[in-house]
Image (cartoon, coloured by chain):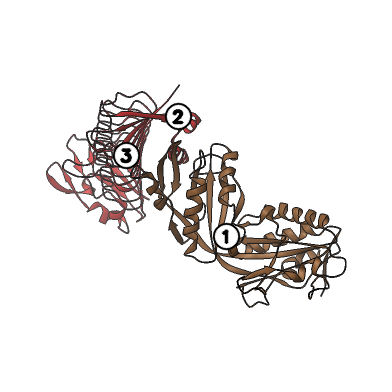
Amino acid sequence: MTTLKLNLQSNIPLEAGTITPDQFQDKSPGQIAKLPVVFGNEPFELGDFFTVDADGSNDIILKGDASRVKHIGEGMTKGNIIVEGNAGMHLGAGMRGGFIRVEGNAGDWAGAEMAGGLILIKGNAGHALGGAYRGSRRGMTRGRILVNGNAGNETGSLMRRGLIAVGGSTGEFTGCFMIAGTVIVFGQLGARPGPGMKHGTLITFQTPELLPTFRYACTYQPGFLGLILQSLRSQGVPVVDEYLTGRYRRYSGDFTALGKGEILVYDQH
Amino acid sequence: MALYINHVEIEDTYAEAFKMWGARAIITARTRKWAYEAANRMTGFATSVIGCKCEAGIEGDVDDTLDGRPGVSVLIFTPSKDDLPKRLMERIGQTVMTCPTTACFNGLVAPDNVTIGGQLRYFGDGYQMSKLVDGRRFWRIPVMEGEFLIEDRFGMQPSVGGGNFLILGENADVTLDAAERAVQAMRKVRGAILPFPGGIVRSGSKTGSQYKFLIASTNDAYCPTLRGVVQTALPEGINSVLEIVIDGLDEQAVEEATRVGILAACIPGIRRITAGNYGGRLGQFKIDMHRILRQEAAA
């Protein structure tokens, strides 16, 4: 277990993409402390901001309020990161494997363009959760993001594959330009969900404000939903039985794009 | 050395079984009734590869299914690896996809696997969708009822087919009673199925025939009506014979099913239990009656 204790109290962001199990593996505390970071626009070493206690394992615990520490776990392929407080922007962006747990909140772009692994955020997530960077053609392509609280705007933008489950509510344009994949929102799905989506699935359990370019198809029991909800249950997400056996209103869209996407709305009647 | 169980003679012989390829499909539905409707159709006309191209049977109920609904497990076997995907496609496509409320999942983790849902998806005519859940891909095919959900790939593995034993009884009633008891016990063994009607065969066959166009014909040595006409294998007092054929995902499953079946079949009125073989020339597996029952005999 490698423990990083943050010794920073500043509003200037610290870009610490080197905080990954891949970078830490087989390194001594001294070697880890020399890994490069960027503070503001100046290069520094990790040890300038963290007290490092390491044993060369694949597991990292980050202590302190890291809400200004960006890129934690970026591109990681294995191992575990536990953030005991908040995490800054780009948490787990582009990660391909492993597990990140954040006990507090995470900033914008958490899991952006990730291609594997699991991110669990116990608090809230920022905007563009699992989304694509500006100019990119794809958001997350594999993996899973679970958020106990709320998520911001453009959750799952340009998502190609994978699963995002939000226990609370999401902001506007959830699933915008989705190519495929699944976003489940247990709270209120933000206004105007799925603009420009080609394929993919948005699932909500409360009545959403839909765009006029989505058309009602039918009310039915989607069999695949049982698989996803059972899988979420196995990861500790509380899913009530009614969601497993209930009926859902299916809306097809977005007909400004391919129109093969869907928004499933739990039918409470 | 002679072996008796409940005064029933167990002949010192072996069942000759063959290498086959097997797969397991889990069919779920809104109710167990509908899961069984599909499973019964999927395993229909699948008694023997001689005339049905595959052998299939219901393995049992499944409660812990992927979608949380009642499930039934089906095993299907073919002589060659190439045939198995074809039979799975035909049978799932025609009997499971057509059945209301069903979904179909792979039930066998094996190094070899084949695309089934990924082929059946074309029935969706471009409106099919896939979902990747926990590393497994599933296809959602739009159908008139709603959606048919099927897993993309199904595992298949080398298996064992044609395990068997014959129950020689004093009359038809007691022989059928013994066979039914055997089937009841054998159906509790996972990894094995009994492909014939009710798990029981009355028309066991031998290879070849006096007719050139037939590759198999009645097992005349065990036909009681032919005693005195052919070289019979039936001792005096035997007036009916029934056979139980077993296919399994591995040799252990076939042996265990054979063992519990024979033990259950040893009731008063049954004189002898034997097994069918071809002198060891055709099959890859020999299921020795005395070996698998040695423990019971010692007890």
Q: Please state which of the two labelled residues, at mark 3 or mark 1, is closer to the viewer.
A: 1
Q: The C terminus of chain B is located in which quarter?
A: bottom right
* Amino acid type, callout 2: Arg
* Amino acid type, callout 1: Cys
Q: Please state which of the two labelled residues, at mark 2 or mark 1, is closer to the viewer.
A: 1
Residue drawn at (57%, 40%) of the image: B34
In 3D space, how far apart are the residues under numbered discs 3 and 1 (Cα atoms)? 41 Å
Q: Position of residue A265 (x, y in %)?
A: 38, 28
Which residue does the numbered mark 1 point to in the structure image? B52
Q: Secondary structure at mark 2?
A: loop
Q: The N terminus of chain B is located in which quarter?
A: bottom right
Q: Position of residue A27 (x, y in %)?
A: 30, 58
Which residue does the numbered mark 2 point to in the structure image? A247
Q: Which chain is brown?
A: B
In 3D space, how far apart are the residues under numbered discs 2 and 3 (Cα atoms)? 19 Å
- In this image, A29 relative to B111: left or right? left
Which residue does the numbered mark 3 point to in the structure image? A200
Residue drawn at (72%, 60%) of the image: B202
Q: Using the image as rendered, state which of residue A233 and residue A41 is in the foreground.
A: A233
Q: What colour is chain A?
A: red
